[in-house]
Amino acid sequence: MTKLIILDRDGTINADRDDYVKSPEEWQPLPRALEAIARMNHAGYRVVIASNQSGLGRGLFDVATLNAMHDKMNHLLAQEGARVEAIFFCPHTNDDHCGCRKPLSGLFEQIARRTGLDLRGVPTVGDSLRDLQAGAHAGCEPHLVLTGKGVAFKGQALSRAFPPNTRVHEDLYGFSQWLLHEREQPAINAMNERISERTSDRFGHVAP
């Protein structure tokens, strides 16, 4: 199992804004989101971010300000005993016709090249359709959180535009609960069973 998680940023880790998150002061983590990342890290998962940041292309902030936002995020993550390994972002607007702006998969292709990993089956988590479409194009397992733009999907069936087998979670912490208790636990149980079988084969069965 490839122990990598790919997260969207705005609306998934931190609160989103209709006028864009433009400064460290406006970058505010969502409740329990940083704790969720810590839980993933402690379970052995590497965490990276794939984020559209068209505010750069629109001239709303510069790269130095974006770095300052991420410095704040990394500082708060460290206080939780967590870390994000890398941040991949697209600075373009739709008018640039780039290949990295989600829903296109360019950011995910960059992640695959940088990590040297096959992204098939790697969970990707976001709050919008385009987040999951981009990940699905790269073979990722799609997870929608009902925060940020995802609030609009609360209590509704997902449209067919969403990738097949999209899982829905209340928030990033809810995703971490699913990851550790539903995705990880069967693998742990199977590993324990194999260890037990090998031990029995080696030492024989002990009579009751």
Image: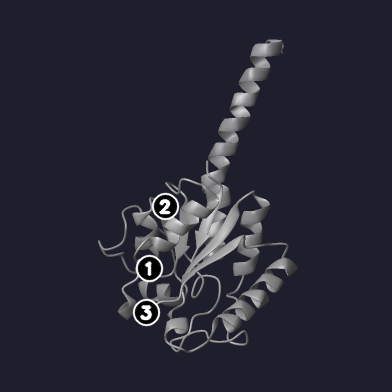
Q: Tell me the amino acid under the disc marked 3.
A: Thr
Residue in the image at 47% along x and 82% along y: 56
- Examine the rendering and report whether any part of residue 143 can be seen: yes
Is residue 133 shown left or right of residue 5?
left
- Assign a secondary structure to mark 1: loop
Between label 2 and label 1, give the one nearer the viewer: 1
The answer to whether mark 2 and mark 1 are in CB contact below 8 A is no
Is residue 132 shown left or right of residue 200?
left
Residue in the image at 57% along x and 75% along y: 30
Q: Position of residue 79 (x, y in %)?
A: 74, 69
- Circle 3 packing at 10 Å, graded few (<14), some (14-19), many (20+), is some
Q: Report the quarter where the C terminus lies.
A: top right
Residue in the image at 62% along x and 87% along y: 25
Q: Nearer the viewer, residue 43 or 137?
A: 137
- Examine the rendering and report whether any part of residue 166 can be seen: no
As drawn, the label of residue 93 is: 3
Residue tagged by mark 1? 102
| In this view, 111 is above or below 207 | below
The answer to whether mark 2 and mark 3 are in CB contact below 8 A is no
Q: Position of residue 120 (x, y in %)?
A: 42, 46
The answer to whether mark 3 and mark 1 are in CB contact below 8 A is no
Q: Tell me the amino acid under the disc marked 2.
A: Glu
- Assign a secondary structure to mark 3: loop
The disc, 2 or 1, on the residue closer to the chain's N-terminal end is: 1
Q: Position of residue 145 (x, y in %)?
A: 46, 66
| In this view, 194 is above or below 203 | below
Residue tagged by mark 2? 141
